Image (tube, grey):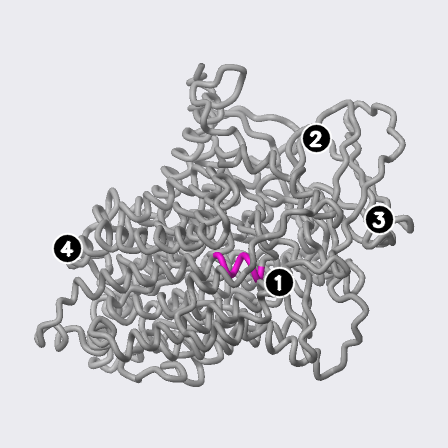
């Protein structure tokens, strides 16, 4: 899987030049048709999304790279260089880091007034070059801030990063800024919610705190990436297939692992530890086959924000919000109106009572696992698309897991609606705190809430007292 | 082809090396948490982090002498245990698991944050705090010593000797504590919390004491390892390290005094063997296993640990030497 991915980047470069970008990505409302159940929501979203996908005037300007004068072949110092340009203007004082596989930084440098940077690595090999996003000037957005390169002796290695301006010629008022943070928060919260609801339902019906849930999210995204990039299936269909795969994975893990463990009468602690071991193995198996770096989807990666009066959003962000909301409403209808939904709530409330009133508990649990797996896969794609700038990475699931826990516990472990409310709050909190504290610490707020809620109201906002003791 | 003597030699060196000491101390802490009291601490690496960074920051940023830095590190472990224990120890076991793993990850993110570069060193980490320790070494730091066919650098030998001495003292302390009335209350809590409460024991207080004590062992592990390696890097303190310590504990036998030592030695030996063998058969012009990239070898141990953890818990929760009835795996 890694090999095709590593030869792909040159073709992505065409997006840097608007004139050559002839193939427009298919309109996003296809994604909605595929996923949205509510017709009203479609009516609301379609006009916005049916507009041409990329307005040329707003097209993100790419960066160009310039060769540095070839350095004398120093025996062990291998020079790597590039020039950082955004919209033709050089970007000075931006930190560029070189990392080896595994994430350890070996060296870093800062670009000069012409945006030129150069650094030396000591040995040939594979390096990840990364832009320190915090050192960028305000308003400059990275489209591709991480590049993996094999550095060899005897030649100058050139690394190109791509930028796009966040907003073109728009004044930002305080209200629109607040609104923007809020909408970002709701978008993120909904994505956490989609994945977190599954975590909460699994807990409600089986009592298992599933530490491998993040890996289900990540595997969903990786499957969609593989279908999209390696097999060339359009992302919408790739996502639908990934949801099916996620549901199958969820069901398979119940049939293959959790049901036999329940049969053996294994305790919940044993199940919890097994889920941790499973999650760890899956994460690093994906690392082996997929690779350690962020890799980008083939579609919808370089969208530009569209102005909606008070707020401007990219199409994919809007689509993320609409799809998540639709899925949430669909899930609520499922829980309230259908037989299986009522059975899920019954098992969640009292397993023994549900069993004695004729509900096939094992079948309900299997359904919950499949549902959660599918939701996790969808959430993984949306998370990558909206929050990780259209990329997929092997640790994305574990990072999200901690926020899922925060949201689900805040709302009340085991409740479906509580999970949604809690995750929304956590999402908003994360985005708000990103305005106040350094960006690389923005997940802290969500996790601080986790500890706070356990002190103040351990059963969560909508949970019942009986579950926690 | 596979060079067996060098593989075995490396394996033995790893069995007694600083990593083995590190995981032993982590696992001794987890033994008190999980083995004796039944607490699920999945953020033991966070305790190691606050211990190591507490010492490193105190020495590097505040210019304290090394012994005071060590005290700061231990105190940081105590504070972290209190912070995590107060909200969670009255709740069901998995809340502690979630909060500890989250806290460990928070701490790692804070220490590696670029905004903290001036304080914790950011992704660069800290160095230079441990020269005081190295100066105490009675060995010739630059010389290579050979013991039973395995070579050690003088400075490593000093760290290894101190480390195992600390492990020995820790084991003695644990042995005395778990045989005391206090230790019997911990076991009672593990077996039946309500029964312990009915006997008038303040379960919350005992659990908190156990959490603090085990956390301090974690902090000691972090301090010893930081002194042995003379450098602190935040990404070393990542969540999977806790699971390594759990695997070591369960292999050696939870609720056994020597469980952590035996388990860590076996774990490191197996790691070293698999790493070396895999590297040898994946490297070179005609590798035996072409489909594994040599840079993926490091990832394989995580996969192995994950599988081992799951399988051990299901099929042999008592490990090699433990007693099955001594292992708490039915949740509350």
Q: Residue at x 69, y 28 (%)?
A: A124
Is A384 a magenta residue? yes
CA distance for labels 1 and 4: 42 Å
Whether labels 3 and 1 share one chain: no
Please report the bounds of the magenta region as a residue range: A381-387
| Residue tagged 1 | B110
| Residue tagged 4 | A264
* Mark 3 vs 1: CB contact within 8 A: no
Q: Earlier in the sequence, mark 2 or mark 4?
A: 2
B168 relative to A258 in the view: left or right: right
Seen from the viewer's position, the closer of residues B99 and A256 is A256
CA distance for labels 2 and 4: 53 Å
How many neighbours does mark 3 have within 10 angstroms: few (below 14), some (14-19), or many (20 or more)? Answer: many
Residue B85 in sight in this render: no
B63 relative to A204 in the view: left or right: right
B116 relative to A275 in the view: left or right: right
Between marks 1 and 4 in the image, the one whose residue lies nearer the viewer: 4
B234 relative to A407 in the view: left or right: right
Between marks 2 and 1 in the image, the one whose residue lies nearer the viewer: 2
Q: Which mark is residue A151?
A: 2
Q: Which mark is residue A111?
A: 3
Say what secondary structure mark 3 lies in. loop
Q: Position of residue A59 (x, y in %)?
A: 74, 57
């Amino acid at each position: 899987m890694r090999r095709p991915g590593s030869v792909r980047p040159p073709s992505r470069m065409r997006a840097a030049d608007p004139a050559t970008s002839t193939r427009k990505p298919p309109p996003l409302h296809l994604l909605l048709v595929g996923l949205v159940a509510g017709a009203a929501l479609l009516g609301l979203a379609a006009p916005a999304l049916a507009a041409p996908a990329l307005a040329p005037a707003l097209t993100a300007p790419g960066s160009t790279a310039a060769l540095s004068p070839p350095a004398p072949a120093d025996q062990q110092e291998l020079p790597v260089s590039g020039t950082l340009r955004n919209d033709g203007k050089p970007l000075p004082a931006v930190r560029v880091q070189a990392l080896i596989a595994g994430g350890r930084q070996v060296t870093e440098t800062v670009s000069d007034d012409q945006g030129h940077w150069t650094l030396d690595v000591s040995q040939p090999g594979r390096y990840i070059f990364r832009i320190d996003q915090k050192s960028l000037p305000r308003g400059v957005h990275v489209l591709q801030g991480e590049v993996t390169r094999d550095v060899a002796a005897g030649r100058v290695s050139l690394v190109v990063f791509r930028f796009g301006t966040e907003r073109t010629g728009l004044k930002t008022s305080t209200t629109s800024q607040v609104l923007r943070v809020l909408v970002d928060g709701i978008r993120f919260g909904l994505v956490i919610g989609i994945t977190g609801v599954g975590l909460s339902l699994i807990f409600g019906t089986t009592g298992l705190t599933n530490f491998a849930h993040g890996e289900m999210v990540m595997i969903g995204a990786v499957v969609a990436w593989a279908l999209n990039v390696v097999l060339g299936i359009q992302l919408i269909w790739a996502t639908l297939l990934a949801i099916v795969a996620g549901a199958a994975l969820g069901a398979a893990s119940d049939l293959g692992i959790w049901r036999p463990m329940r049969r053996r009468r294994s305790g919940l602690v044993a199940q919890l530890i097994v889920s941790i071991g499973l999650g760890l193995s899956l994460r690093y198996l994906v690392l082996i086959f997929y690779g350690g770096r962020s890799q980008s989807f083939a579609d919808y990666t370089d969208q530009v924000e569209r102005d909606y009066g008070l707020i401007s959003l990219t199409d994919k962000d809007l689509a993320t919000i609409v799809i998540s909301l639709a899925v949430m409403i669909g899930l609520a209808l499922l829980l309230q109106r259908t037989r299986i939904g009522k059975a899920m709530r019954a098992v969640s409330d009292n397993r023994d009572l549900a069993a004695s009133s004729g509900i096939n508990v094992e079948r309900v649990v299997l359904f919950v696992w499949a549902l959660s797996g599918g939701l996790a896969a969808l959430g993984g794609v949306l998370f990558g698309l909206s929050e990780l700038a259209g990329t997929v990475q092997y640790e994305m699931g574990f990072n999200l897991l901690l926020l899922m826990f925060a949201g689900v516990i805040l709302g009340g472990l085991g409740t479906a609606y509580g999970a949604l409310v809690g995750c929304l709050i956590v999402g908003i909190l994360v985005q708000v705190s990103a305005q106040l504290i350094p960006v690389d610490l923005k997940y802290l707020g969500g996790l601080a809430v986790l500890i706070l809620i356990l002190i103040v109201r351990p059963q969560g906002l909508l949970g019942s007292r009986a579950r926690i003791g | 082809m596979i060079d067996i003597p060098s593989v075995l030699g490396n394996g033995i060196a790893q069995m007694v090396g600083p990593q083995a000491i590190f995981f032993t101390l982590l696992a001794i802490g987890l033994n008190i948490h999980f083995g004796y009291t039944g607490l699920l601490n999945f953020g033991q690496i966070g305790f190691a982090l606050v211990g190591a960074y507490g010492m490193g920051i105190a020495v590097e940023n505040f210019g304290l002498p090394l012994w005071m830095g060590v005290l700061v590190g231990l105190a940081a472990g105590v504070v972290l245990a209190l912070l995590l224990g107060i909200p969670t120890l009255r709740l069901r076991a998995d809340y502690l698991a979630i909060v500890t793993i989250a806290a460990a990850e928070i701490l790692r993110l804070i220490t590696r944050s670029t905004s903290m570069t001036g304080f914790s060193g950011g992704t660069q980490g800290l160095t230079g705090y441990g020269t005081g320790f190295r100066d105490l070494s009675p060995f010739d730091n630059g010389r290579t010593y050979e013991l039973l066919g395995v070579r050690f650098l003088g400075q490593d030998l000093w760290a290894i000797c101190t480390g195992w001495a600390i492990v020995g003292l820790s084991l003695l302390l644990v042995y005395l504590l778990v045989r005391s009335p206090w230790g019997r209350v911990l076991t009672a809590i593990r077996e039946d919390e309500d029964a312990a409460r009915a006997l008038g024991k303040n379960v919350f207080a005992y659990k908190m004491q156990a959490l603090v004590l085990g956390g301090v062992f974690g902090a000691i592990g972090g301090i010893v390892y930081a002194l042995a390696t003379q450098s602190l890097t935040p990404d070393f303190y990542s969540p999977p390290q806790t699971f390594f310590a759990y695997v070591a504990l369960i292999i050696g036998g939870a609720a056994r005094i020597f469980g952590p030592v035996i388990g860590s030695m076996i774990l490191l030996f197996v790691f070293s063997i698999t790493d070396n063998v895999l590297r040898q058969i994946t490297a070179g012009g005609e590798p035996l296993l072409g489909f594994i990239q040599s840079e993926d070898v490091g990832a394989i141990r995580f996969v192995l640990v994950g599988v081992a953890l799951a399988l051990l818990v299901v099929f042999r929760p008592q490990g090699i030497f433990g007693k099955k009835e001594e292992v708490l795996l039915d949740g509350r």
